[in-house]
Amino acid sequence: MVEAIIWVVFIFYLIYTLVPTFLIRRLGYGVFKNRSDSPCAALTFDDGPDPQYTPQLLDLLARKGTRATFFVLGAKAEHYPDLIRRMHEEGHLVGLHNYMHHSNALMTPWKVRRTLEHSADVIERITGIRPVHYRPPWGVFNVFDFLLIRKFRIVLWSMAAFDWRSRGGTDKIKRKLIGKVKDGAVILLHDSGDTLGANPDAPGYMIEALADVLEDARRRGIRFARIDEHLPDRRLPDRLVRRSAEKRTALPAASSRRDQASQAAGDAAANARDPQAAGDAAASAQAAGGAAAAAHGPRAADQTAASAQLPQPAVEAAPSRETPPSQPPTPEKHRGLALRAWMLWERLFHRLYRIQPGDSEHRFLHYRIRTYHGQELVLEDGEIIRPGDKVAELHLDNEWLRQAGSQNSSMMKLAVQMIRAMGNSMPRLAHRLLTDPALADLKGVYGISMIHRGTKQFGFTVLPLHNRLWRWSSTLYLRVLLGMLHPGGFGRLQENTARLNPRIIAMSTSQMKKRYAPGLSAAEPSSGAYYPEEAYGAVLQELPDGVAGKGG
């Protein structure tokens, strides 16, 4: 029992946080962590603001004429609003780092969103600008954080100085950074030492070392910029601009003149990011002799607006270099990398759990023999599968589904192909299970599936999944899987989430023998095709609405 609980917890966290963190951090899916063609580097500071060290850091950055990005905690921003205001007024970018320094792996998805929205409200009341750049604590994600990509610009890092520990002092940080900072790098540092695993005095060593790091970078011609200046295609997506504008109108106006000026600057920035307003700005620049802004269109107008709203500190770095044009990775490329990583995990899963093909010719169905530990399954033929019975656990071949999905122009065609694959595979699977002497005590087969309506015509009983934790984790896993495999990605699945509920499908050994192998012999059937006509209507009815929408 203890071993089973450990495995459930492990699989839950594997799906909830380990796999998504790997996909996002290692493959760069949906995040920004460096830019090789950038003419500058980016300094980023986490965990602040800190009343002792953040002012010292801001003083240093002001002396060096360097702008940076601060990923702040909402709770600290509420306690030290003057530091947030100073960051903004001195030209730095303020981003989000959760409300408290809690890992997303230990929070529910709705709590992550609630704390982010609250933190964004706090910062917007102080600066007049709603933050959209986000870095989760420790760079750890949960599977629902894939949806955050639609609302925030998620930023990681390419270099870390491990400055949250005092051991090694300034020398350790210098060894990590001096001579190694390069164009395109995103450097992770910390201006507070009061989080879990950090030393309270560590930021003092970081600030002392940073002075030398900035001087070394100046000598080598390395400049530093904010993350929003560093990102490819600095123009924010329209949905983020609209969302920021809507939130601003809902919040109370700032009381001080300084806050009112910040609010006006924020409105100007949002208007400049709007395509029509940006075009007007570019036209005005051209009429006034701004040839560069006119040549680059909306993006140059966006840069002009950003320059107008923020102070321009003196820069000690080398002369600026022209930014070469870049093509940011497309969502399709990111999805392709994520899908390949998922398929690699599928192959590893099959090997770890010794999952076997049910049909040597068709890869559609796989199975593994195990002792059943779930809820009692009362089948339509009167048989009952109880905990402790030997069963064959069924698995669809997701590589088959991926290839079939890419080869079919609509989900209608894919559904027909799935029915044919099921009709070919079930007789061969039944023959394999029923003729194996080691499986004489096999009680039946079962599986968990989102697509279950048409399975009744193949002899399965469809049952609800009672265990709440298992139902929740199964739903999570299967929705992520369908989002990976579906050509429309997660976006199309969001349209029909109410229909995507997992069910248990099960069949007794006696029912399997009666339906698929009434005259068992030692020889495997040469063509075990079984296509119940009624299955077509049921499966076709479910797939377009439940998974793909009518257009496929």
Image (spheres, rainbow, N blue to C red):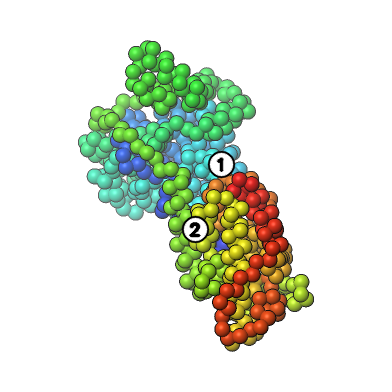
Residue pointed to by mark 2: 403
Residue 545: x and y, percent? 66, 50
What whole-number distance in Å separates the C-alpha atoms at marks 2 and 1? 38 Å
**Which of these two is toward me, 74 or 148?**
148
Q: Position of residue 77 (x, y in %)?
A: 52, 37
| 226 displayed left or right of 529 | left
Residue 6 visible in this rendered orientation of the protein: no
Query: Counting other residues with Cα less than 10 Å from the Cα at mark 2, is it few (<14), some (14-19), or many (20 or more)?
Result: few
- Residue 466: x, y in percent? 71, 64
Q: Is residue 463 above or below residue 48?
A: below
Q: Residues within 10 Å of mark 1 (few under 14, many from 20)?
A: many
Nearer the observer, disc 2 or disc 1? Answer: 2
Q: Which mark is residue 493?
A: none
Question: Looking at the image, is mark 2 or mark 1 earlier in the sequence?
Answer: 1
Q: Residue at x 28, y 43 (%)?
A: 181
Dot 1: element: helix
Indicate the amino acid at tag 2.
Answer: Gln
Give the amino acid at mark 1.
Answer: Leu
Q: Is 41 above or below relative to 282?
A: below
Decide if residue 409 is on the left or right side of residue 234: right
Location of mark 1 (residue)? 116
- Nearer the observer, 38 or 197: 38
Image mark count: 2
